Image (cartoon, coloured by chain):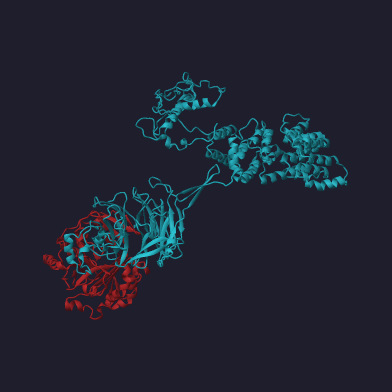
Chain colours: A red, B cyan
Amino acid sequence: MELHILEHSLKVASIAKEGIQICTHGLIKLAFLPSKTRCKFFSLTETPEDYTIIVDEEGFKELPESEHLSVAEATWLALNVVSGGGSSSSSQPIGVTKIAKSVIAPLADHNISVFMLSTYQTDFILVRERDLPMVMHTLSSEFTLLRVVNGETVAANSLGVTNGFVKPKLVQRPIIHPLSSPSNMFCVTSLDPDTLPSVATLLMDVMFYSSGVKEPGAASDDSGLICFFSFSLIEGYISLVMDEQTTRRFPNNVLFTSASGELWKMVRIGGQPLGFDECGIVAQISEPLATADIPAYYISTFKFDHALVPEENIQSVIGALRTNESAGQ
Amino acid sequence: MSGSKPDILWSPHHVDHFVICDSELSLYRIESVGSAETKAGALSLSEETAATLLAINSDTPYMKCVAWYPKHEPECLLAVGQANGRVVLTSLGQSHNTKCKDLMGKEFVPKHARQCNTLAWNPMESNWLAAGLDKHRADFSVLIWDISSKFAPEASIATEKIRLSSGDADSGLVVTKPLYELGQNDACLSLCWLPRDQKLLLAGMHRNLAIFDLRNTSQKMFVNTKAIQGVTVDPHFHDRVASFFEGQVAIWDLRKFEKPVLTLTEQPKPLTKVAWCPTRTGLLATLTRDSNIVRLYDMQHAPTPIGDETEPTIIERSVQPCESVIASFAWHTSSQNRMVAVSTNRAMTDFTVFERISLAWSSTTSLMWACGRHLYECTEEGGEGGAVDQDITTKMRQRAQSRYGHDTAQVWRNHLLAGGDDPQLKSLCILKIWSRGNRGTNSLWCILASRTLSSPPLARRRAGAVGVARTDRRMRCGSTARSGAWRCSCPAGSSAGPEIDVEPFLKSLEQEGEWERAAAVALFNLDIRRAIQILNKGASSEKGDLNLNVVAMALSGYTDEKNSLWREMCSSLRLQLNNPYLCVMFAFLTSEPGAYDAVLYESSVAVRDRVAFACMFLNDSQLPRYIEKLTNEMKEAGNLEGILLTGLTKDGVDLMESYVDRTGDVQTASFCMLKGSPGEVVKDPRVQCWIENYRNLLDAWRFWHKRAEFDIHRSKLDPSSKPLAQVFVSCNFCGKSISYSCSAMPHQGRGFSQYGVSGSPTKSKVTSCPGCRKPLPRCALCLMNMGTPVSSCPGTGKSDEKVDLSKDKKLAQFNNWFTWCHNCRHGGHAGHMLSWFRDHTECPVSACTCKCMQLDTTGNLVPSDSI
């Protein structure tokens, strides 16, 4: 297995709902006019609380400075697991489940905080740039580490820092944050970048005017529905996560749908904003899922984490997680 | 090929069918204008061809890529890759083939929808269709579909799950289970099957090129690179692959897959298409975005990429099929260098890339050129005595054949060998005999011109070792002495004493029929009577000109008087005389004393005659000035007669340089300058260049014997040009040089020449290494040790100089030489080897399959001259 350390230097930011209008110019440019910027990594996730932006340094220049824009102070690097194409087993679990044991758990054991972004195409594991030596040390035994420099993939030289690292204690990871599961169902999908202009206005409507009817945050309280939408444009690939109701607004054949047409339900992690320093949160969720061999997407935002699991598995997921929760208590 | 940008595909079997695909598929037939003119709606593609629309298919929206079924039947089956990753089989035009009907509309659906980037039919296993898809998490990006597969039972279960299906009611046509799944968690941007094996698939993945082997799908060969788009195999070299990234094309050799064997110059705009020409080797066409030219790279002469680190030569050029921006192009599958280009506004152009013409002169003036697959030889019409014969190479070749320059005993004869029709060469050859045996005098006239005369008369006497002193003396002694100056132009008088009689020289001129010149010489020696006598003789001779009598009559009327009618008439009418010598005679007679410009600057009079005249009649201050002026004139004109004045000195080289510039005659220049006395003349880079060029010419004419002769001649005159020993023979056992051992052991007293070259069978039979006494290698044919002469030939024991080096003897000696193949190291007597390879191609040593003689490219050529 190969672990690619991508060359993007990423910033994680949050835009308050009420301040979104000052940022829309930059966001539209980043999302729909990729040729006008040198940004290669852009992700926007709308939650009831805020908009979370993950963007590389080039793209970050497009955003204005504002009191509504809060930025996590660290610079993040994206890691990407490539299976090297060698294995041909056809029924592999997808999403974080695949990498739960090989990447996420070891990083949690070494107290490295991770920020997850699953897309239609792949899973990105974001780590702080300053943690990179530790990350490489931790994962070098399991993976071939490759670094992307100027688009070329080269072998990452081991930084040779092996002293002073404490042998991690392998502990049980109980789930310590409250979980909730909204009732709406989601699609993880994509579309042809060539058709993006034709649905741009629709996407803008979904992105910025979702709360036009109801009060912000009210949706999740009232009907068990959550307002959640994620758009990413990473190295030319578009990924969308949206409510199944929303997909119906798109023309036929524009969105990529899988042959099985699977739908996903969400598990939302955290009662209080999670912050960026606590580690092991992703591991707490993904390990039980991996044990149960349930595929999952995982999207971290500025305040909370979100796991997407197949709708037919939601009960068993909740069951598995409850067990872990109670084990912690 | 998204919506606005059309692409073009040639039918793999119908040479006149092609498909344009943008939002729909349109089938066209291309015809010559003659037959298409009558049809309405035919689109003109070029002056000679037009296209007729045969069918349109707009059943498949969101087309991303198209691939034409490679087999004959069904002929018009196309696979279309769509934006959502589905691959649909469709067709154009009517087809009554049932197989085709079964396949029509069949869909191959990947597990997760994403764009289908590329499609490739397996050229052998034509049921296999490879599709390259974008990335989707853990899903596979390279799917190989079997188009003949009936939807599997589990596929029908899968179809139950399809909820977002749009028109999948006819689910019998949907296949969801690929034959092979490759490239997990990656994106595939381009694909091609490798002709090396039907189960090898080359794919341009997200950041690497990968070769998948379907016999063992768990393994792949890959190389990390950015150049992953548009992978395509050279149809003529199955190991050569091109791929590109943005503006740069990389050429790969699959045998050495670690890095590109070469990258082509980067274009400022991103490339959109790269295609090898199927009808010509090593021609790659590339197209960049928004461009109206197709750039061609000719790798015809590029060295094979293996092991050759030298920068290959690639000829880059551009062609412009049409005015507008080209969207795509496609090479015709069989017409040579032909392509159809389609512009963004769907205008099509039929275009044939004109082949570069390469032209070659042979060293024997024939001209060949190659264009495409044709080779043309130029023949001159009515070529008899034409320009070809006048060409200097023809002349030089003829002269070399007649051994021009090699007659060192009688140098003056060389101009006859040269054809005897060039007055400049003649004067040069005559000069050579003057200088023969006294090389110092070559520069005599130089000394005369530059130094001696500036401090007359003492220095002049000192310097004029042979001729000038005599000239000098005689000039003082009155009329008879003047003839001394003529000595420089007189071939017969080299041994004459101080009292030089001009008479023998006149006689020789008379013999040669040079009546006018003889008369002029007689006149300049102030012997009018003799001059008149000569002219009379000339008029009465066999081919004589009767007019000479008239001239003699005019001459006889000479009067000293200044204002006589004779003088007046002669000075005006002499200009109408054709012969320069007659002309200068009257000029001399009518001129004022000391003002002889009409004689001195009459350029048709030989330089040596003019110099002699100057020596006789000019005073000490006029003479050097005249000589200097004349020298410079000659140098500028490159007139070989001027060598008389410059000698074979640096000035002579300057003169020769302008001569060579004018004529290209390196042959004369080489022979002449080899005789140059001071070493630095021969060492002059220009002289060395002429000599090397002449040797190359001889080689090119296959005049190898002539070249050897020239080299011998050269090494006699210029010992430094002797080549160093190039072959050393060392013993296999002790490693010592055989010749070295000989010289190291003087008591043996045998030279290396005895080891085979001239040794007699009885006297010098040395068949073992003198160092270690081990036997020398054996001849592969007679099995005798090296050093044993060939038995059949008579020994040439008499190694004295007196040996008559007749042809037979020399060849016999060569037969004794030992020769060996540099490849397999087998060898033997040269004679044996030669006769063996007359009938065989392989090495005479059994079990050795080396084709020794064929490795020697020049060995198969026959010299075109004889010794």
Q: Is residue A269 left or right of residue B509?
A: left
Instruction: Give left or right: position of B592 versus B828.
Output: right
User: Going by the picture, which residue comes out furthest to the top?
Assistant: B762
Residue B620, given in percent of the width and then of the height, sits at 78, 41
Q: Nearer the viewer, residue A222 or B695?
A: B695
Q: Nearer the viewer, residue A288 or A316?
A: A316
Position above or below: A204 against B510: below
Quadrant into which the N terminus of chain B falls: bottom left
Find residue A94 and report its image quarter: bottom left
The quadrant the C terminus of chain B occupies is top right
Tell me which residue sits at (73%, 29%) in the image. B495
Q: Residue A226: name its quadrant.
A: bottom left
Left or right of B239 on screen, residue B164: left
The residue located at (81%, 41%) in the rendering is B551
**Location of residue A133 in the rendering, given as x and y in whole percent from the top left corner:** 28, 58
Q: Residue A73: tell me if it is visible.
A: no
Left or right: B835, with A125 as reference point: right
Q: Position of residue A278 (x, y in %)?
A: 21, 66
Residue B458 appears at what percent x and percent y? 77, 36
